[in-house]
Image (tube, rainbow, N blue to C red):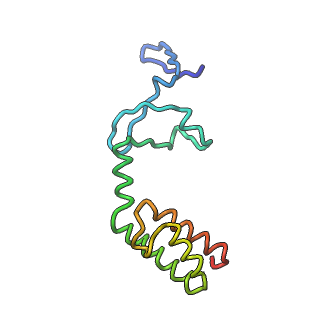
Amino acid sequence: MFYIKTKQYCGKTINIEISDENVFTRCPGCGREMPVDLADIFADGEGDLFSTKIFCAACTKTSAEDRFSPKDAKLATDGITVLANVLRKAGYWKELSALFDQFEIEDMRDLEPDQMRAFSDALTSLAVMGGLV
């Protein structure tokens, strides 16, 4: 059993058992109080009660939308295009063609936003295995 021990102003000490029903935190984005499962926080071995921040679902969604703004998508597309052109010029046109077939695209502009990461990872893997990086 784990518990929190605190001393009141009158000098009396109170022990409160920690359970999955009485541990809470506040979202650093909006201040909303949320229940917390400490097992989840420490599951990866990196948990830290002093620096761990847990965002509510609404703030997490807003943050994800901010990260994937159209401007950022344009930058990501430009980077993928540059890497694909380097690979093509380095003689990897067959591999690029197979990758385009795998993603069922004719042009990189045909990539859906949820395909960008996988396509980028595949290009990077091709560049690394080919010794370009």
Answer with left or right where residue 30 lies relative to residue 131. left
Task: Name the spot of residue 12 as percent of width and height, x first.
Answer: 48, 12
Name the quarter where the C terminus is drawn: bottom right
Task: Name the spot of residue 94 as percent of width and height, x first.
Answer: 59, 79
Q: Is residue 105 above or below residue 91?
A: above
Q: Nearer the viewer, residue 25 or 72?
A: 72
Residue 40: image quadrant is: top right
Q: Nearer the viewer, residue 59 or 48?
A: 59
Residue 111: image quadrant is: bottom left
Task: Name the spot of residue 4 as percent of width and height, x first.
Answer: 52, 22
Answer with left or right where residue 69 lies relative to residue 40. left
For the point 52% across and 63% down, the residue is 118
Task: Name the spot of residue 99 as percent of width and height, x first.
Answer: 54, 71
Q: Is residue 120 above or below residue 92?
A: above
Q: Is residue 13 above or below residue 67?
A: above
For the point 47% across and 14% down, the residue is 11
Answer with left or right where residue 65 lies relative to residue 126. left
For the point 52% across and 78% down, the residue is 84
Name the quarter where the N terminus is drawn: top right
For the point 35% across and 55% down, the residue is 65
